[in-house]
Image: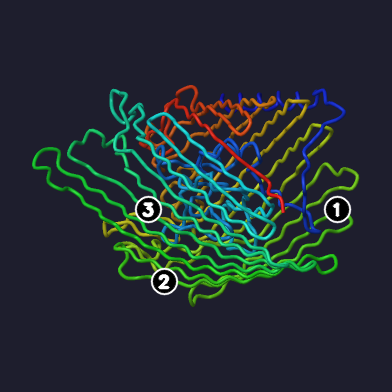
Amino acid sequence: MRIGLFIVVWICLMALQSRADIPDTVYLKQVEVTARTITAVPHDRLQLLDSMMAQTSKTLTLSGVLGLNSPVFIRENGYGGLATASFRGTTANHTLVLWNGALINGPQLGQVDFSTIPMFLVDQLVVQAGISDIHHITGIGGVVTVNNLPDLSKKLQVSLLQSVGSYKSFGSFFGGSLSNSKLQARIRAFRKSSLNNFEYLNTAQWPQQKMENVNAQYAVKGFQQEFYYRKGKSLFGLVSWNQWDERQLPPIMTNVDRGGRPEEYQNTKFSRNVLSWRYFSGSMTLSARTNLLFEKQHYFLKTTSSYPPYAVVSLIDSENQSSVWQNHLMMSRQLGMYHMEVSTQYDLEQVRSNNLPEHKQRRFFGLSASSEREFDSGINLRLGIRLDRMNHERATLSPTMSMTFVPKSLSSVSFGLTGGRAQRFPTMNDLYWFPGGNPRLVPEKALQSSMFTAWQTQQNGLVAESRFTIHASWIRNWIQWRPSSFRYWIPENIAQVFARGAELYQSVSLVRGHWNMSFKAHYSFTLTTDEGQTAHQQHYAGKQLIYIPKHHANLNARIDYRRVYLSFGTELVGQRRTTYNDDLEVFGNLPSYQLVNLGIGWSWRKFNVDLKLNNLFDIDYQAVMWRPMPGRNFEFVVSYSFEKYLHP
């Protein structure tokens, strides 16, 4: 019913698109556009952070932006808790995150907590599903790219933001930048905290009752320092991101009445640093980058008996440290009708943990090359090959191909397809966790393909784009953690996963006088099943993998008039399996849910005021079994921005 309603609203808005009364003349601000000779853009590449979103999302985290504005499904372990991403039916460690070219997926778990990435630190956000750029290690699911962009115009910039929200939530943000034609220095700092004591419906008890989320407060603080220097044809950059996260972890719904004096928290601190160099000479570009990433995590859990003297029942005190050194060198050049790129990569990962038998390290080497050509017939063809080697294991090759076709007689329509091979290496925990690590694991390997058709038009003040994509991936040696006869879990290469589906995207924007209206919507249908021998033997072959919804959709609309805006957003998440046991009819599935958010804002000179209402209809829902999510809540934001151009 919800999906039908979503589609009906979509069709109605598309009908309005074709009947809009469009003015003859629209005055736009000056825009500078730069591009290389080959202009084809991968159809799976979606740039999310436009100027309007950048202004209203600064107090959010990356998880909040992706779930409502992209086909990516975000799985949240409670409000303020761990948030991971799923692309096209894959899991969290199949999604790669690049920050200024640095891969920030942790070497132990291989995943990224999107709730720890504040949008205040982000200048550019790009989402690419399926086969990613061949010059980085490929992601089986997809890649999220987060960048900071230099601005070498002569100006002084200052920004201040203060947010206040439900559950005693507060956020303070400061940014400052000073630049001229050769040098820019920029700093951004923030602090966010929340008591996080929202009320929820405990569905694990009978009868169900309202309860307060306890032991759930969190505080996050950090800063990012950037330096850019241009000398001749070279551009140097140094970016350092340092952050401290402190989280109390609340009990799950089934444990809230167990008594005793439970204590659980997780503290994380990291430092991510990127030193880069780019050299431009005619049609040739050289780039080099070295990245140093440090992270320390402390997890503590203590449970006691329910009555005095509260004897300790379980105690976990885990400390994990990792350091990663990444190096990347790349050259691109235009040779006649061909655009050629070659790159090499060398990484060193080191981990110290009281959950590993000893200090572990591994080395990674990568080499890639690609060629792209645009033919007069309207065909753009790109071929790539990548070689990867981990430690002294045998090197593997990953070829890729993408092609787009734009008919000359119908330039508003395009068609395309991609195909290739991708792989994922086991994480440090997969290999060495004690007890249970399996050093005999081999990399997961995927064969992927996708086809798309797209249509776009731009006429006077109307800009519209439609895109339909079908995709399929066959992933061999999928790693699964399974219970063993030794009473602990071990990872094995046993699953053979077939992920397939379809995606639909529509965007429309219309400018008329002082009115600016925009509409964007995504819908994803994903079917992901294990077709391996073990799955057939245990009778769960052909069933949807756990925590992957078949249906996921979001829709966002916004209207701006002079200094005032009104926004509407909704996200629909379909039912998700939590077990392969069909006997658990009630607790084996999480029901679908639909969230509605509203926003209103006003700007005056250098000030902006925003009010956001989230979960407007106060829906009780869970993204992860027994982890409650908040009902209706609000956030109030006041911001001040100052910008002054400096004369020579």
What residue is shown with label 3?
268
Cα–Cα span, label 3 and label 1: 51 Å
Residue lying at 80% horizontally and 26% vertically, measured from the top left: 18
Residue 261 position, x and y percent, is 19, 40
Seen from the viewer's position, the closer of residues 312 and 529 is 312
Residue lying at 77% horizontally and 55% vertically, measured from the top left: 35
Cα–Cα span, label 1 and label 2: 48 Å
The mark that comes first in sequence, 2 or 3, is 3
Seen from the viewer's position, the closer of residues 15 and 596 is 596
Image check: 345 left or right of 41?
left
Q: Quadrant of the C terminus?
A: bottom right
Q: Quadrant of residue 587?
A: top left
Badge 1: few (under 14), some or many (20 or more) residues near its Cα, within 10 Å? some
Residue 189 position, x and y percent, is 48, 48
The mark lying in front, picked from 1 and 2, is: 2
For residue 361, the mark is 2
What residue is shown with label 1?
378
The mark lying in front, picked from 2 and 3, is: 3
Report whether residue 572 is seen.
yes
Q: Residue lying furthest left in this view?
A: 309
Q: Residue lying furthest front in this view?
A: 648
Image check: 85 left or right of 429?
right
* CB contact under 8 Å: marks 2 and 3: no
